[in-house]
Amino acid sequence: MKIAFFSTAAYERDWFTRYQGHHAITFLEETLNAHSCHLAKGYEAVCAFVEDDLSAPVLQALKSQGVKLVAMRCVGLDNVDLEAAEEADLTVLHVPGYSPYSVAEHAVALLMSFVRQIPQAYTRVQQGNFSINGLTGQDLHGKTVGIVGTGRIGQAFSQIMLGFGCRVIAFDPKPNLRLLNSGVRYVSLQTLWAESDVISFHCPLNSHTANLLNADAIAQLKPTAIVVNTGRGKLVDTAALLNALDNQKLGGYATDVYAGEKGWFHRDFSGQPITDDELNRLRLHPRVLLTAHQGFLTEEALQQIAHNLLLQISYFQNSRQPGISKISM
Ligand code: NAI
């Protein structure tokens, strides 16, 4: 199958090339959107990622050019208009099951780096400053960790936090029996907001979860609470969160995602002005630790994404069975 691969990054070419088999992949650096979708002409499939635009007009344009399949090399499908895809009779595939440890361990890395001030400590040592004044952190052992969403990634994160000796509470409309048995207590969102020292987001972004952590919710948190977000930027109201940090109403924000990340993340703007004021507030705030959506970026996850997606594409090609054209989230 001829596949137009949008938003290609150097780190993923190797694995997709290794597993491409009989498929013919054209790697494009362009982001998929209304301006670039003409590049998919002559291809049966497009492969896209979190920064690509798969709204109704783009999907309709792809369909009219002969595209039959949209293969998303990610878990979340919040940037795909699934109803429009179904109407256009486009099959949408994604990779639901790749290493959840990649993201869960990144959430832990963010949390640990934040509480032990590792970026500040690293910078000091680089500068020959071996003073440790002002770097006092806190133990995670014994703290209450609230987890929003205990699917694959939330479960992996819970298990690590239990291993740290934390008390783990969780909110999920579909509680996980295995986690219940391992000591996780499911609570209401209100209880989770009120009792947690650390809150970590692992639920999908959809109409129910957009702005889940808004000003009202932030007002219910402990003023020392640390929020960790490896889910999606739009799960939190960034402006309300920054205001709470400025007013000492919140302890910190360690995040891999940002609501306005599209167009910025996964690109190099070194030496150029960053014109997004909210992004500047986030990346320069002393109580924020920000990475640019790299939770999935481990060798294991990249290998599994490439292998799994190309297998699904082969299956689609061989059977012409519809894959996932509508997903309940
Ligand atoms: P999953 O589908 O295994 O688990 C999601 C869980 O969230 C489910 O248990 C579901 O019942 C729960 N949920 C649904 N609505 C909820 C709500 N309103 N409140 C609380 N929980 C709710 O998904 P998985 O693989 O664990 O991924 C979770 C999210 O992580 C993805 O949707 C994606 O947005 C994000 N992600 C981020 C990555 C990164 O690189 N930073 C990489 C991969 C995923």
Image (tube, grey):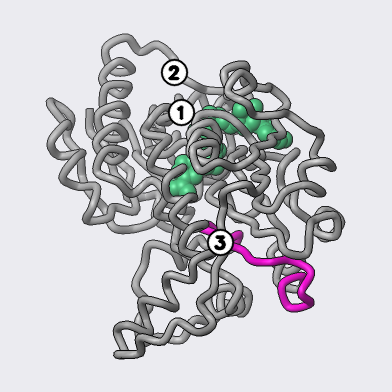
Q: Residue at x 48, y 34 (%)?
A: 156
Marks 1 & 2, CB-CB < 8 Å contact: yes
Residue 61 visible at all: no
What amino acid is found at the position of numbered circle 1 in the picture? Val
| Separation of marks 1 and 3 at Cα, in angstroms | 32 Å
Tag 2: Cα neighbours inside 10 Å, few (<14), some, or many (≥20)?
A: some
Mark 1 vs mark 3: which is more N-terminal?
1
What amino acid is found at the position of numbered circle 2 in the picture? Gly
Of the four image quadrants, the one with ligand 1 is top right
Indicate the position of residue 63 as horizontal and vertical percent values: 44, 34
Give the left or right position of residue 180, taking residue 244 as reference: left
* Region rendered in magenta: 244-259
Residue under numbered circle 1? 92
Residue 223 visible at all: yes
Give the left or right position of residue 72, taking residue 184 as reference: left
| Separation of marks 1 and 2 at Cα, in angstroms | 7 Å
Marks 2 & 3, CB-CB < 8 Å contact: no
Indicate the position of residue 189 as horizontal and vertical percent values: 79, 39
**Closest to the observer, 94 or 160:** 160
Residue under numbered circle 3? 254
